[in-house]
Image: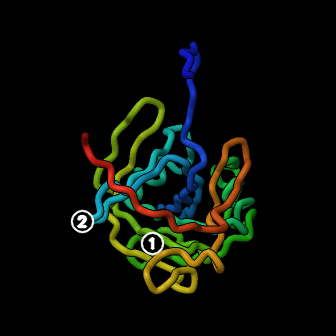
């Protein structure tokens, strides 16, 4: 039975964490973002929420480009550190021993350990409460094909996708099961 309470509940976990990378005026930075989403498939558009107090916010705003990287569970420590430390205080790539190359379409860092990356050109930014929602056209896709099956689904034998549980805890999708499909009909 549901009960009304007098405080906020943030029920958005477990969830995938996106790693936002950006390059502006010779500075490269990286941060973890829990609030992100595909917005459109055709054309491909992606959005990410970034708080204005974050060092990454001003870099993305000024660069007009960013990349969304997805890392495997083995890099959960790096994911956590990029959401904990500020790029204003340290080089998070060096601190986390993360290698990268510059994205061909945006110049944003493409993380070597990522299994999927979207390079985005910012097309909109709006404020919603305490975060700004950056929206980008996906102008280049990158994929580690060794981590996916021929049908496009993740190969869970070779890829452990991290799910953030909150409070620095992660789990992963290890096994998949096929379920019978059910069609919901109106009565």
Q: Provide the residue designation for mark 2.
A: 42
Q: Tell me where residue 80 appears, x and y as whole percent.
A: 70, 53
Kindly report the distance in space between the C-alpha atoms of the residues bearing marks 2 and 1.
23 Å
Q: Residue 147 vs residue 86: left or right?
A: left
Q: How many marks?
A: 2
Identify the residue shown where x is 50% and y is 61%: 22
Residue at the spot x=41%, y=50% of the render?
Answer: 61
Nearer the observer, 179 or 33: 179
Instruction: Tell me whether circle 2 and circle 1 mark residues in contact (CB < 8 Å).
Output: no
Examine the image and state in which quarter residue 93 appears: bottom right
Q: Is residue 44 above or below residue 140?
A: above
Eye-nearest disc, 2 or 1: 2
4 vs 33, nearest the viewer: 4
Residue 48 shown left or right of residue 1 in the figure? left
Given the current orientation, which residue lies at the most extreme front position?
187
Q: Secondary structure at mark 1?
A: loop
Q: Position of residue 125 (x, y in %)?
A: 34, 45
Residue 26, relative to residue 134: is it above or below?
Answer: below
Q: Is 36 situated above or below 74?
A: above
User: Which residue occupies 74% across, 59% down?
Assistant: 77
Residue located beneath label 1 in the image: 107
């Amino acid at each position: 039975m549901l009960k009304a309470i007098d405080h906020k509940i943030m029920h958005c976990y477990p969830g995938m964490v996106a790693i936002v990378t950006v390059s502006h005026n010779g500075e490269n930075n990286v941060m973890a973002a829990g609030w992100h989403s595909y917005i459109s498939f055709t054309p491909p558009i992606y959005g990410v929420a970034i708080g204005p107090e974050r060092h990454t916010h001003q870099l993305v705003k000024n660069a007009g480009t960013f990349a969304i990287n997805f890392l495997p569970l083995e890099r959960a420590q790096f994911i956590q550190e990029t959401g904990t430390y500020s790029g204003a205080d340290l080089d998070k790539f060096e601190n986390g021993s993360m290698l990268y190359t510059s994205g061909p379409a945006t110049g944003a860092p493409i993380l070597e350990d990522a299994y999927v990356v979207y390079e985005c050109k910012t097309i909109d930014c709006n404020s919603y409460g305490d975060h700004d929602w950056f929206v980008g056209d996906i102008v280049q896709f990158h994929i580690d094909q060794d981590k996916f099956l021929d049908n496009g689904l993740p190969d869970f034998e070779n890829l452990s996708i991290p799910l953030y549980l909150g409070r620095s805890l992660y789990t992963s999708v290890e096994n998949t099961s096929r379920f019978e499909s059910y069609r919901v009909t109106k009565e």
